[in-house]
Amino acid sequence: MAKSAAGGPFPGGVNWVLPHQGDSAIPDPLQSPEAIVDALAAQGYLASRRIAQVIYLAMRLNKPVLAEGPAGVGKTELAKALAAGAGRKLVRLQCYEGLDESKALYEWNYRKQLLRISSDSSSGWQEMSEDIFSEDFLLPRPLLTAIASPDPVVLLVDEIDRVEMETEALLLEVLSEFQITIPELGTVRAGSQPLVILTSNNTRELSEALRRRCLFLHIPYPSPEREREILFARAPGIPEALADSIAQVARSLRGMALKKPPSVSETIDWARTLLTLGVARIDSESFSETSHVLLKYQADIDIALKELATEG
């Protein structure tokens, strides 16, 4: 087997089998649920006690977190805030239909390999293959990057419900063992335990095997009181009365038969829009003129205007 090239993308020599650190790798900012709440709040993410407890247990038990809920309630932002609050690198695997092993794990730099072969016609195949199938020719993708990192990272597997069952099975296998075998090089095993956050918008049912492997976290739409707190944190300077009105309107809209109810991120955008336009209170006119920021389908806007007028 070929030896690793000096200065390659991963540490550790031929097999890259690195020691597993477990709980000792938990950074100080995340040593308790209360500390997690504080660390997330410092990043502008207002986490409930339940969210903090699930994250804490995931780190202690070395389990991934499966965060489900409507789109736009803060599942992805949770991973980003955790990485920033803990001082960890965020590694993101954005899932989509058609995602395969080469985009999730690794692939070889075929163009570079061909250039290497064409530039040296004197070497035998054995010597050449040991060269072109070395770390210098490897393109690490998110899963390999996270597992090979010598420092703890936050691995975000975003919208896992978008991938096919075969890819889900691959992800499950990798996340169960936290190691990847590359036939030409050897085994990469996690040198430090990544904190893994998988998100799902419930566009399809996930396998029971994946659910068993994870700690489950459901993030619903926030209550009006919690949404008001979020608006204070993410739209600085918003008047209390306006924040109250936005939170109440958002709750009413989410109770309507809309194609796409407003997400938390969209209520934040709406709050910032109203502040920018100098709107002090929400009435039928201001809602009609700014509803396109909050709702993304004309049919939804028509329904909302009609029902809010009736409620008013």
Image (cartoon, rainbow, N blue to C red):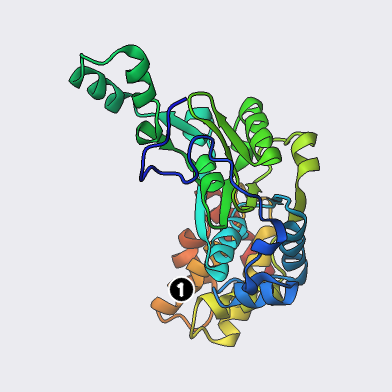
- Can residue 104 be seen? yes
Q: In which quarter of the view is residue 57 placed? A: bottom right
Quick one: 184 or 90, which is closer to the camera?
184
**Mark 1 belongs to which amino acid?**
Arg
Rendered position, 310 above or below 7: below
Quick one: 88 or 210, which is closer to the camera?
88
**Residue 6 position within the rendered picture, expressed as x and y whole percent measured from the top left:** 36, 42
- Left-right relation of 138 to 30: left
**Residue 156 position within the rendered picture, expressed as x and y whole percent measured from the top left:** 57, 50
Q: Residue at x 72, y 67 (%)?
A: 52
Secondary element at tag 1: helix
Rendered position, 224 above or below 140: below
Residue that carries the numbered disc 1 in the rendered image: 272
Q: In which quarter of the view is residue 267 placed? A: bottom right
**Residue 160 position within the rendered picture, expressed as x and y whole percent measured from the top left:** 62, 40
- Left-right relation of 292 to 253: left
Quick one: 28 or 41, which is closer to the camera?
28
Q: Residue at x 43, y 27 (%)?
A: 2
Quick one: 63 or 206, which is closer to the camera?
63
Q: Residue at x 33, y 24 (%)?
A: 110
Rendered position, 154 above or below 37: above
Q: In which quarter of the view is residue 125 placed? A: top left
The C terminus is located in which quarter? bottom right
